[in-house]
Every structure is written in structure tokens, then in C-alpha cells.
Image (cartoon, rainbow, N blue to C red):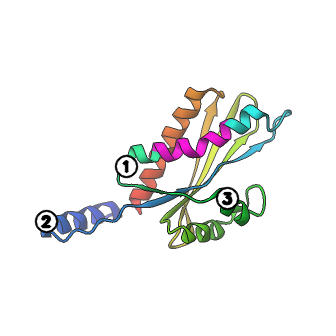
Amino acid sequence: MNRLAMKTLILVSLLLSGNAVYAAQRIAVLAFELNDITALPNTPQEQTRTASLQPLLEAAIKKTDKDVEIVRIAPQAQTAANGGLGYLFRFHDLAASLGEQANADWMIVGQHSKPSFLYSYLMVHVINVKSKTLAASIDIELKGNNETVTQHGISSLAKKIRGIIAEW
């Protein structure tokens, strides 16, 4: 029996017995970092777009599952824990420790990588705080830089994140 079938069986058994205890998943989404390696990097427009990714992703995750609780991590705490561009993205145990301080179950650490003016990538690590391990790495390609493209990419990302967390 696979993991999902086993979890479903246990949940149904608990519901039928009347002893179900359900705790909402607590997810912390860090502010995305911009890794712009184009000929004209870090334009104000691209910085604004990147700054919009965290709140858009939080809203999209909440929309995919109403029982999720979004945990806030202060920008100062993220800055203090981050040793430089990509530091928390590469060191999952340190990102998990930051999530542990905020009592989160999951950490979402993301980068907005822009190698070209024509496309960019939303790169996200889904980190299990309890085990301090990388649960999944997700890359979404964005072709273009308008709001519709960004929103579509964020929606796709949120669905993938919820699927990964549901499997655990």
C-alpha cells in the first residue's frame, strides 16, 4: 500500500471513530531573491516583480487549501539568517532552523532567476522543518514578464507545493 493510500485509510478510520485530530499545515514563504544575470540586471521593474512573488504565492497556497496557515517570518529575521544570495536556498538545515523559530511545518525558499530578457524561472525549495530536509525542488519557467505570466506561474507553483506537502 502506498503512502497516500495508507494516510487516506488512517484518516477515514479516525473520522469514523470520531477521534479525528487535524492540525493545519503551517507554511512559511520567504521573500524571493532576485538572481538577475542579464546585461542590464536588477532593474526597478524586476525588483518590484520579484518583491510581489512572496505575497502572491502565499495567497495562491491559501487558495489551494483553506486549512493551511501561512506563517510570517520577519524580513529582518530572513536577512539575519541569510549569508548572501542563495544562502538559505542552498542550506536547507539553516532555512529549516529559521522555520523552526517561527513554529512552521514547512519552509518555502525561492529565487527568481533571470538569465534572459525573454524568460525567467521561479525556483523553489520545499523544506520539511521537522526533518530539516529538502522535500522537493520546483522550477517554473516564465516566458515574458507581464502580470498574467507571473500569476499563472505562481498558481502552478502553489498547486505543486500543495501536492508535495500532501504526499508527506
Q: Position of residue 109 (x, y in %)?
A: 61, 56
Q: Quick one: 145 or 53, which is closer to the camera?
A: 53
Relative vertical location of residue 111 with respect to residue 116 in this rendering, above or below: below
Give the mark nearer the N terminus: 2 vs 1: 2
Relative vertical location of residue 14 with respect to residue 32 in this rendering, above or below: below
The three-letter amino acid code for the residue at tag 1 is: Asp
| Mark 3 lies on residue | 89
Mark 2–mark 3 Cα distance, whole angstroms, equals 42 Å
Q: Position of residue 56 (x, y in %)?
A: 54, 41
| Mark 1 lies on residue | 65
Callout in the foreground (3, 1): 1
Badge 3: residue crowd in 10 Å (few <14, some 14–19, many ≥20) = many
The three-letter amino acid code for the residue at tag 3 is: Phe
Q: Which region is colored magenta?
A: 49-60
Residue at horizontal 62 percent and vertical 34 percent from the top: 142
> Dot 2: what SS?
helix
Residue at horizontal 42 percent and vertical 51 percent from the top: 163
